[in-house]
Image: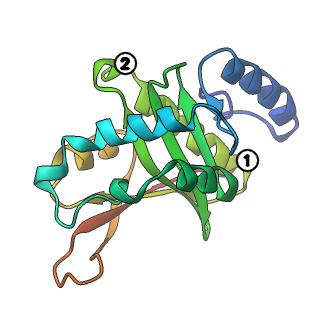
Amino acid sequence: MTYFRNAAPLEWKQFLFKWTAEMRNGSACKVNPDSASIPDILTLVQQAFASMEARIDPPSSMHRLTVSSIRDACAAGEVWTIGDKPDACIFTKRKGDYLYIGKLSVREDMRGRGLARALVELAETRAKMMGLSGLELETRIELTENHETFRRLGFVKSGEGAHKGFERSTYIIMRKNIAAD
């Protein structure tokens, strides 16, 4: 998934073709708004986020996620999955000069196999193709293990924020800057 890191500008089309072919062969798949896999993506996100429910306040936005809102996310940005079930997913959308990533989810029995890393690398590749400065995400203050995971993936804390109605910070903003080719 790191084909673009050292690619010269004229090689982009060749790498894109190879990368797209690999995505079709099971590495990752871009989800269309009319995809039959959208209910399975909803289930994946709900299951992946369920373990944090008792630890975070306010409740996760995952509760507002529906088949319809995932279709909207596919149309407004991109949703990518790995695996037929699916085993992992990521939602992306452009946010200023960054590609915002959200709902990064991996099935519990598939964790530790590099699927989250592969999806973050995919998002990085997409950001490069769009000429963006990097990736951005938000992670809850309470989920310190997620902060560490994202640090290992090259993200650094760039700020904090609070959900509506909260005076204290409820999430941190992390960014990963990428080098322009």
Residue 39 place in picture, x, y as percent: 51, 37
Q: Which mark lies nearer to you, 2 or 1? A: 2
Q: Is residue 175 visible?
A: yes
Q: Does residue 164 lie above or below 34 as drawn? A: below
Q: Hey, which quadrant is residue 72 in on the image?
A: bottom right
Q: Which mark is residue 129?
A: 1
Residue 67 place in picture, x, y as percent: 53, 47
Q: Residue at x 50, y 29 (%)?
A: 118
Label 2 environment density (alpha carbons within 10 Å; few <14, some 14–19, many ≥20): few
Q: Residue at x 29, y 81 (%)?
A: 164
Q: Looking at the image, which is closer to me, 177 or 68?
A: 68
Q: Hey, which quadrant is residue 160 in on the image?
A: bottom left
> Pointer 2: what residue?
113
Residue 124 place in picture, x, y as percent: 57, 44
Q: Which mark is residue 154?
A: none
Residue 8 place in picture, x, y as percent: 79, 36
Disc 2 marks which amino acid?
Answer: Arg
Q: Is residue 37 left or right of residue 104?
A: right
Q: Residue at x 57, y 53 (%)?
A: 68
Disc 1 marks which amino acid?
Answer: Met
- Image colouring: rainbow
Q: Looking at the image, which is closer to me, 59 or 139?
A: 59
Q: Does residue 97 lie above or below 20 as drawn? A: below
Q: Is residue 92 visible?
A: no
Measured in 3D between alpha carbons, the distance from the residue under mark 2 to the one under mark 1, in whole angstroms, is: 26 Å
In which quadrant is the N terminus drawn?
top right
Q: Is residue 41 left or right of residue 46?
A: right
